[in-house]
Amino acid sequence: MLDYETLRLIWWLLLGVLLIGFAIMDGFDLGSAFLLPIVGRTDMERRVVINTVGPVWEGNQVWFIVGGGSIFAAWPPLYAISFSGFYIAMILTLGALILRPVGFKFRSKLEHTRWRTAWDTALFIGGLVPSIVFGVAVGNLLLGVPFRFDSSMRASFEFGFFDLLSPFGLLCGLLSLSIIATQGGGWLSVKTDGVVQARARQAAMIAAAAAILLFAVGGLWVARLDGFVITSAIDPSLPSDPLAKTVTREAGAWLGNYGRHPWMAVAPILGFAGMALALLMAWVRKPLAGFLASSVGILGVISTAGLSLFPFLMPSSSDPASSLTVWDASSSRLTLTVMLVAAAIFLPIILAYTAWVYRVMRGKVSGEHVEHSDSAY
């Protein structure tokens, strides 16, 4: 059996893999929904956009479900604090996510213009709201979340929903929206042709340029933020106890890991390079290369946030000692071991199934395809 420290590190890495997988796979169908009214000007053009993601979006949700389940089982204090403290944001996100399947299923059931316009709006909201909320959440992690534990480990929260919408949080929300729009534009460029593809290509270029700019501004902003530093000795083999440490705040501390481990600079480099390459590939009309480059950019941006925070999972701005870290917020060693065995069995199955689905659904979607398909949305 692996030691406790190694298991905690493995599950921190797996959490990152699941979040990145979700952002890449679900990112393009969220981005496609957000871009629906931009790249689809007629009813048929919008049906083409919807049918590029209609057959695969449900499979993409697996990453979201597995990620949430993993947080619940591997990091229960993190799950409890995030779902209790961010419950309004969570409800908004889940409500918006529910609009997508309903919109896909019902939009084309009637030919009435108002009916279809209403569902187009619902799909747009379903792509816009989660994309922004996810970024706002990450921004608030870097700022520190106002919560604290008492001596009985009961959590109290000192913020409301609108407190999350700080300038830095909104900046991160716009960054999240821009990289997801880049991913959506890249996907639509691969799966469509004609005027829809041309608009998607243009949207991907604009979104990628915005992502590069916002990522750079965010990095400069983070360098001036007060980060968190653990000042007491850490024994990664001890049972989880978030209150058994001392933590201070220091200006620029979120960049400390890059000074101690220069190899971590690969993450922001991938973030910038991936988005720059996505813009370039869209410019030279290489849609598949652009989509892959955008995926690399997402990997880089999310890895940058995770590596900057490490070992913190959710810092507390109200009481830094209550912050949740990799070393004091995990499940037991036995639980992590059993879950690791389950992940080793089922994660390859998910990857194989996903690869098979995309192979079956390969090829472009056109208006002719939509008109002559009985299963089209």
Image: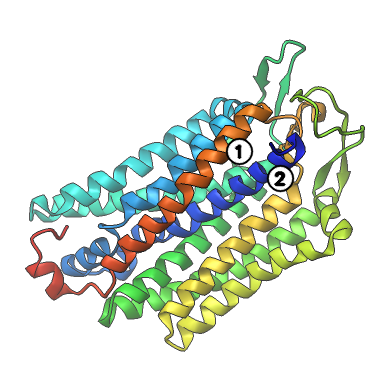
Give the mark, 2 or 1, whose residue is nearer the N terminus. 2
**Residue 49 appears anywhere in the view:** yes
Q: Amino acid at mark 2?
A: Leu
Considering only vertical position in the picture, is 191 above or below 92? below
Q: Position of residue 126 (x, y in %)?
A: 36, 48
Q: How many marks?
A: 2
Q: Quadrant of residue 377?
A: bottom left
The residue tagged 2 is: 142
Label drawn at residue 164? 1
State whether residue 159 is above or below residue 353.
Answer: above
Q: Secondary structure at mark 2?
A: helix
* Residue 94 percent across, percent down from the top left: 40, 37
In this orientation, which residue lies closer to the viewer: 306 or 144? 306
Q: Are marks 2 and 1 in contact (CB under 8 Å)?
A: no
User: Where is residue 11 shown, x and y percent of the image?
Assistant: 64, 42
SS category of the residue bearing label 1:
helix
